[in-house]
Amino acid sequence: MSKAVYISTIDGKPGKPGQVYYPLTVRTLPQPSPQGRELLVKLSAASLNHRDLFLRQHLYPGVTFDVPLLADGVGTVVSAGPGVSDPKKWNGKRVILNPGVGWKDSPDGPEEATGYRIMGGTKVYDKGTLQEYITIDESEVEEAPAHLSDAEAAALPLTGLTGWRALVSKAGEINSSNGAAVLITGIGGGVALMALRFAVARGAHVYVTSSSQEKIQKAIELGAAGGVSYKEDGWDKKLLGMLPGGKKNFDAIIDGAGGDAIEKGVKLLKAGGVLSIYGMTVSPKMPFVMQAVLKNIDVRGSTMGSRKEFKEMVEFVNAKKIHPVVSRVLQTEIDDLPAIDGLFEDMKHGKQFGKLVIEFGKSSSGSKL
């Protein structure tokens, strides 16, 4: 048998978006059997993303009560379907799961007509990682880097992929490595922290913004060259004053807030600089000002990423021995719903610096936090 965690309706009825907070529920299901090219993975850890909180608030498209929650997971392969090309290659291997499907390798976006489909809690993809066993096609897993604990490996997929595309694919090689000056806004969230990790490992001079001096200091400890509070008057000028000799402006900004990002970007970026935006938490609209046109600022929207980018990201993490930032690990049984609810409360109140992880099983390999 296999236990899995879902959201459930209240009094048998779905609630109104933003006016509901769906409770968690546990179901015990038959252990799945791998078919065709599928692998059976015994999951050992999974991590939260903001989309999981939005699902509980009915603020995310395609909410369903029939698919387990969460998109990030790590586990050990315990069996293989009859169509798997080389079962011995996978048997006993610790793997991380590609968090979405429908996007193979196009640099522009998902190739499939149905678009990109993310794991966990929606009608568009029938798999989620907050369960004890999962079947998944062998093409959708990567061997977990050996230097990562289960908690770190579970923290990597979604935010790692999003951060990689925003920094490397969208900001570009010349603007994200080898002495480039990169600004990462809103440090503390999972994507921003992975972008920080990647940019530092690629040799960029990285600076951050936050409303919290504590988070700025933690970012500096992780390799950032400096940072400022965006609540300070003149914070943009202060940032420019921190740049190393010979640098007058930033090459790229990696932003998850939106709002006045373009207006600030005009002052901060070099001519032809890139503003890579992976989220708009402040406002769903941004004014595109004439100064950005005159300065040839390149504003690029960025989502998660392709299967190709996922593989590249994992390989980079392995080669550079990068550790995702984990805020808290809950070690418990998968049916300990009050404790799991506590992680959601952390996210709801913005208490975390890094990822929130549930570790509910032990894999056969990997270091420990």
Image (tube, rainbow, N blue to C red):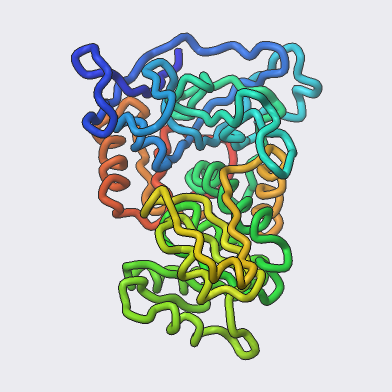
How far from the left and from the top, in percent, is residue 123?
A: 47, 19
Residue placed furthest toward the front: 290
**Residue under the point 67% across and 19% down:** 38
From the viewer's perspective, is residue 125 above or below residue 205?
A: above
276 to the left or right of 24? right
Residue placed furthest toward the bottom: 245
How far from the left and from the top, in percent, is residue 158?
A: 54, 42
How far from the left and from the top, in percent, is residue 33?
A: 59, 11
The one of 357 and 109 positioned closer to us in this rendering: 109
Whether residue 150 is visible to the viewer of this picture, yes or no, is yes
346 to the left or right of 129? left
How far from the left and from the top, in percent, is residue 215?
A: 37, 67
The one of 350 and 317 positioned closer to us in this rendering: 350
Whether residue 369 is visible to the viewer of this picture, yes or no, is no
**Residue under the point 27% across and 36% down:** 341
The one of 183 and 1 positioned closer to us in this rendering: 183
Q: Quadrant of residue 170?
A: bottom right
Name the quadrant of the N terminus. top left
**Residue under the point 61% across and 29% down:** 115
Residue placed furthest toward the left: 11
Residue placed furthest toward the right: 85
65 to the left or right of 160? left
From the viewer's perspective, is residue 117 above or below residue 254?
A: above
